Image: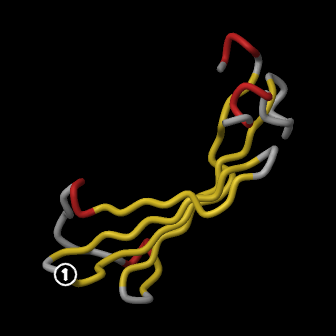
Amino acid sequence: MARHGWWLAFAFAACSADGTPAQEVTRAPDRAQDLVSRVERITRTRVDHSYEIHRAGELTCQACSTLACVGREGRPRLMPETLWAR
């Protein structure tokens, strides 16, 4: 990606555990296999993801993030056609 002059950078991320803001959360670590991630939306400039962590069948944490396609100067740009076309 970088050699072609574009990157996917985090433009937004949020996390909540039981409705508590992330900076106040102190919980036991979860295992990677407890993570469910989904691509919620793809546009020509961004990819929105959602995440859930479950322990013993109980939802313990939810999160979301947006990756934005940016050029060398750090400004948003269109994703290359090779990435966009599936």
The quadrant in which residue 5 appears is top right
Looking at this view, is 79 or 84 the one in front?
A: 84
Considering only vertical position in the picture, is 48 above or below 15? Answer: above
Residue for badge 1: 57
User: In screen coordinates, is 15 left or right of 29?
Assistant: right
Image location of residue 66, percent across then percent down: 64, 55
In the depicted structure, whether residue 25 falls above or below residue 73: below
Q: Quadrant of the N terminus?
A: top right
Quarter-of-image position of residue 18: bottom left
The spot of residue 61 in percent (x, y) is 35, 75
Residue at x-position 72% and y-position 25%: 82
Residue 77 place in picture, x, y as percent: 86, 36
- Graded by Cα atoms within 10 Å as few (under 14), some (14 to 19) or many (20 or more), the crowding at tag 1 reads few
Residue lying at 31% horizontally and 69% vertically, measured from the top left: 53
Percent position of residue 65, x then y: 58, 59
Q: Is residue 28 left or right of residue 5?
A: left
Secondary structure found at label 1:
loop
Label 1 is placed on what type of residue?
A: Gly
Q: Is residue 52 left or right of residue 34?
A: right
Q: Nearer the viewer, residue 81 or 17?
A: 81
